[in-house]
Image (cartoon, rainbow, N blue to C red):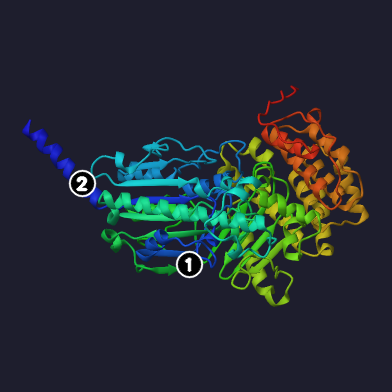
Amino acid sequence: MRIFTTFFISVAMMSAVNAAERPNFVWIISEDNSIHYLDHFFAGGADTPNIKALAAHGITYDHAFSNSPVCSVARSTLITGCYAPRIGTQYHRRSVMAPMPEGVRMFPAYLRSLCGYYTTNRSKTDYNAKPGKGVWDESSNKAHWRKRKQGQPFFHKASYAISHESSLHFSAQAMASQPTRHDPGKIKLAPYHPDTPTLRYTHARYLDNIVKIDEVVGRVIAELKEDGVLEDTFIFYFGDHGGVLPRSKGYAYESGLHVPLVVRIPDNFRHLVKEKKGSREKGFVEFIDFGPTVLNLAGADIPGKIDGRPFLGKGARTREFTFGYADRFDEKYDLVRWIRKGRFSYQRNYQPFNFDSLQNDYRYKQLAFQQWRQLYREGKLNAEQRQFFEPRAAEALYDIEKDPHEVNNLSGDPRYSDTLVLMRNLLHEKVTGINDLSLFPEPYMVSDAMDNPERFGRLHAARVARLVDIADLQIVEFSRAKEGIESALQSNDPWARYWGCIVASSHGQAPQDLADLIEILALDDPEPLVRCRAAEFLGITGDVDPRPIIKAALKMSKSEVATNLILNTAVLLQDGRKKIKFDGLTREDVNHSGRYVEARLAYLSGRKPPAKVRKKKTKKG
């Protein structure tokens, strides 16, 4: 008996030693806020003394980015360490859950299985990938590190919705009856926002929310101190992506991607990092790097099949540039890729006619969004304020030091031609290097790739590269692009024809022979999504009424996802310069229904979307 007792005491002592050798981790995540709302990062932001206290005892990262400007995609990137367009997790909200890539687990699972960590999540997950087993010891709104075994190291992730977009879904009555702590009259508005009492109040109210987040940070610090583990614990404070005033969350700009990040370094593990207390790091870090950084500090190996790398600990380094992406947000489709290097950002709009303000029901619950659009319709905005409602350039280059809100596109300025080419090439290498699955329309990805999206991308790498080359015909003069567009329109690959139509729409023109070819596709192509894109071109150029073609494509649609994509084009044409009305579309015009289909049909007809959606039975055959 004494032998067994001695054995268990020895094991317990070894566990205690191992625990003492491994730091704890706490992630404090504020939802929907970029650097622009904290004065620690940006002039005019809220004062955040608790976050500043973390910074004084650690590191401020001046260039931290979320990869995606929206919740589920950003969080999927964060938890997997993988770029979302490479592994099929790039759409918000997901139409189908993606499997984790072969040989990859969500990183807390490595902490549990390899290092003995107690992992807790309070409580938001919101991933587009299937978690698998063994990720969390507890994931709930009551999860806490205090439930671990004595001496067990822990990883605790906590999200706080105080700053979430929904906090700004207030009424006009609330504006009148609920004063803000921050003075709306002293707010520094972004130049693209109209200077109205509504925008000022909304901004001030959001700064109040950031102060509340700072108070949460203070409470977490107090709990760690009370438990005697503060100096054993790395504390990461960061936003889960940008937001949340108009033109931030959901959009691939600094306002949607550039997040605040402060890491407090515990005294007992200061030997693990080379950075000094109170330092500010200028190198770039991305969400894909956060998991590998924790694993590195915990002494675990970094999985070989992920995209991230550690920015703290042994062998750590920051990046020279960062990569961002925006795809579907709820019912609103777009395709944007983004690079930030040094003081410049580069935005590649693969559907430049798809103006930023395109209807999204959740966006327009905010009074500031509603008022901004109304002022545009009334012709009361200046040039910078109108940009949100107008077609974009296929590529944009911004000097963030001179133009932090990205309103002055330098892509056409010959003084920046070398920088433009550099950024363009970086983005091309990134998109082709990850086999970006968004070059295929989402319905095809769902039907053909979702068993193993990462493998599908690898097997179709040459095809993706070919589609990227077609899409890049947008950024050359039409005279040089014409031959490539014609070849794409005549391809046996439906997605080459699909992109050929998009490129033609991007140029907004085509000689009669190409226009005739696109009209033939609109009427006869066997793929309804090609017909839809052909109709889009015809509607943008005004050559042919696109409505009968859109209706035919809806009847041919093979899924709810495809139906929503086709209806996105209808909304684009209705709200675009031609104002082509689709108010005659009804449920009888679609074979598939669902949440987003109903939202689109309601908007097109001027109705409010129903609170509950009744699925329409799909016709067999």
Q: Quadrant of the C terminus?
A: top right
When the figure is inspected, residue 302 is found, relative to residue 589, above or below; the finding is below
Where is residue 18 drawn, in percent x and y?
23, 49
Number of disc labels: 2
Q: Can residue 354 be seen by looking at this rendering?
A: no
Circle 1 packing at 10 Å, graded few (<14), some (14-19), many (20+), is some
When the figure is inspected, residue 337 is found, relative to residue 148, above or below; the finding is below
Of all residues, the one furthest to the left in this rendering is 2
- In the rendering, which numbered label is found on residue 447? none
Circle 2 packing at 10 Å, graded few (<14), some (14-19), many (20+), is some
When the figure is inspected, residue 431 is found, relative to residue 536, above or below; the finding is below
When the figure is inspected, residue 384 is found, relative to residue 334, above or below; the finding is below
Which corner quadrant of the image does residue 106 belong to? top left
Is 340 situated left or right of 318 in this image? right
Q: CA distance from mark 2 to mark 1?
A: 36 Å
> Residue type at mark 1?
Gly
Q: Earlier in the sequence, mark 2 or mark 1?
A: 2
Is 311 situated left or right of 230 in this image? right
Q: Quadrant of the N terminus?
A: top left
Where is residue 463 drawn, in percent x and y?
67, 49
Task: Check whether the beta carbons of the residues at disc 2 and disc 1 lie within 8 A of each other.
Answer: no
Label 2, on which residue? Answer: 16
- In the rendering, which numbered label is found on residue 283? 1
Image point (48%, 67%), residue name: 283
User: Judging from the image, what secondary structure is the residue with disc 1 in?
Assistant: loop
Image point (82%, 45%), residue name: 574
User: Judging from the image, what secondary structure is the residue with disc 2 in?
Assistant: helix
Q: Can residue 585 be seen by looking at this rendering?
A: yes
